Image (cartoon, grey):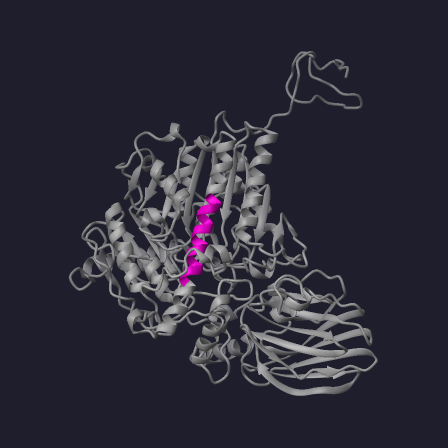
Amino acid sequence: MSHSDNGQGNGRTYPGFKGKIGRTFRSSEPWWPPRTAAPKESPNVVVVLADDIGFSDWGCYGSELSTPNIDRLAASGAQFVNYHSTPLCSPTRAALMTGRNPHSVGMGYVANLDPGFPGYTAVLPENQPTMAEVFRANGYSTFMLGKWHLTRDSECSEAGDKSSWPLQRGFDEFYGFLDPMTNLHHPHRLYDGNSVVQTDRYEPGYYLTDDLTDRAVSMIKATKTANPDKPFFMYFAHGAVHAPLHAKREDIARHMGKYGIGWDALREQRLARQKELDVVARDTVLPPRNAEPGEEVQVWDELPAEVQNLFARYMEVYAAMVESIDQSVGRLMQTLEQLGELDNTVIIVTSDNGASREGQAQGASNYQRGVLPEPGKRALGEDSLRFDLEHIDDIGGPNTWPHYPRGWAMACNTPFRLYKTTTFAGGHRVPFVVGLPERLRAEASGLRRQYVHVVDVLPTLVDLLNLRMPAERHGLAADPMDGQSFARALRSIDAQVGRDEQYYECIGNRAYYKDGWEVVTKRVPSTPFSEEKWALYNLEEDPTQLNDLSDRHPERVKEMVEAWEKAAWDNQVFPLYEGDGIWQLIRPEWEKVLSRPVRLLPGTPTTERYRTLQLLNGRSFQVVVDWSYFHGDEGVVFAHGGQESGYVLYVEDNRLHFVENYGSQMIELPSVELPSTSQQVVVEFNAREASKWHISLHVDGEVAVEDHEVPRIIGYVPFEGIDVGIDRRSPVSWELYERRGPFPFTGEITAVTYIPGELSGDSNEKVLERHLAMGTAYE
């Protein structure tokens, strides 16, 4: 290509271009526009975030489980034994991504509510750069796999505001899910970038952790093939080991019979191992079983033998999931090693919070039953236990949605008290391992005992790798990070780091750490905050929080509680969440559009979970099927949900069948003989009674089934949306799926229309109205 001088010196010109491009140079000198490039030999960075892993769950932290890859990183790098997350998933992810305290960036709770308060907006602020944006600004490729959970649930649909989705928050590529959890055998809704992955069914043996790892390996290979000098940042946020507890059958089999010893003995064994490994001090005392109201753990030896066998099965599945995370880490390490990049990569592996007690006292093969109480029965009573015993061999497989009893969470958090969501150590003291390139290690590897917090991770990476921290985002000045670098602790075992204070808050539970001391309180919903007692612990002498010193040091308690309150005001923690569920009832006015009637055409992709729930939650509704049915047509007419819970209408052998899956308990209405032709079917769901539906079927205007009572599905399930003419992915009816697969309808469906009706007395809106009326009565 020829260049000419346009009288403006030696600047390059192009035909038809009126000005000068770039700097002045001789016409024979090549020119390229400026670009941001990472400094030469910048290391890759991989951050692996497991979900709900307890402090003692990896081998290097005292577990009996085989985690050789994570242990290898710990042995050659830095293993922290006094690292703290927040007590909950979304807040930890927000703090990790921004280096700021979670409430200060609007993520004081999970991204599944939006009560209208600044600390709980469930969306990251526009001005704050994320970790991905920091790395991208420094010339890195940026990849994300797995669970995001930093987008409001009302924004997760195709029509949602995508400004808080991974690609819009700094990632070049994203493959995973936006929700808090998913089915690991049949994921309900995966995204590839901004697009929903469309599939009718998963291949036999599909497992999400393997799929995510395959994609992660592909991303690494592709970028290093395209440009071996360009570093990458990868954020791999596992769905494991969050509920549902799903694992491959062969992995579960390796653990059969290992957990009959029970959680009491397992705690003792893990603590002994922790002392051998020097993870905890030799004089560490194991707390008694958790006994706080609502958190109690049963004595293992007092359980009937068949119940012990059932409970052990849950832990076998959990163990298989933990090891699957390590296998995933191993595959990443192997890929990096094959590419000659392992010693050029910083690898962090940690957890978002402590082990979870969501399975309550006895767990469940479908833990949605814990939030789907049948009228007149305890959510997880004798009937549920008997059901689980009868299906014990299925637990962990694709036709279950299980969670373990909280006794196992207690054991996983050894030696600390309580669980996820609490501000005692079991909720937020978690494993944290860093593998480092040899050139970044100043001395031998080993245990680090410095107090560090999740908000410190981004500042540490910025410091360690000499990254440029963006001062603004989208033209808005960024706030300074709250975290402090602990890079010195990576280079030196005994290095002092700057953090000596930190606040905690989760669902009204609070704590404040300062100079080795901590005050902590556990929220009792709907009780006066002024009546709460703050306990005081000297963590240097009493890391397991056994000896409350508040009566001996009232001035220290007063000082630290005041420090907590100041931090709360500074970080948008107020108004404090009561812990009584009211905030979950408060939703923005604009969401009302989501409860308008919707007409679904054949071929419509599966609808998104939250948007779909607005059509039926807390209300009566109708489903109108317009079709041209002829004898011999068969298949699914519509389906909503999967193995977690749902309902399906299908035709087989010229009969119309309606089946409800209520937490894996199948309820079938009387089937209906269809006429030779039909133009319309209407299914009425009447919610006139609390926790019940009264269902009627109408065929061409004639009543076919009238007022059939079934339990009402409530809460945040069904997790899968609505399908028309097929039942995609996880099926509502496993028995039907085994016989017919997704069972696409062979006839002609014109449309399926959902028509929301009257609100029921127990709807969120009606309950909130009553609470507001009670509140204003005292004004």
What x and y, as percent, mark residue 553?
Answer: 17, 59
Q: Is residue 545 magenta?
A: no
* Residue 179 visible in the picture: yes
Residue 579 against residue 518 in the figure, above or below: below
What x and y, as percent, mark residue 505?
Answer: 37, 59
Q: Is residue 321 magenta?
A: yes
What x and y, as percent, mark residue 287?
Answer: 24, 62
Instruction: Report the label total.
Output: 0
Residue 197 against residue 135 in the figure, above or below: below
Where does the magenta region start and end? Answer: 315-329
Q: Quadrant of residue 511?
A: bottom left
Q: Main secondary structure of the magenta part?
A: helix
Q: Nearer the viewer, residue 772 or 742?
A: 742
Residue found at the very far left of the displayed protein? 552
Quadrant in the picture for the N terminus:
top right
Q: Is residue 740 left or right of residue 751?
A: left
Q: Nearer the viewer, residue 153 or 67?
A: 67
Q: Nearer the viewer, residue 135 or 210?
A: 210
* Residue 91 visible in the picture: no
Residue 619 against residue 543 in the figure, above or below: below
Q: Residue at x 57, y 51 (%)?
A: 176
Quadrant in the picture for the C terminus:
bottom left
Q: Is residue 417 left or right of residue 104?
A: left
Q: Residue at x 49, y 49 (%)?
A: 237
What x and y, as percent, mark residue 18?
Answer: 76, 23
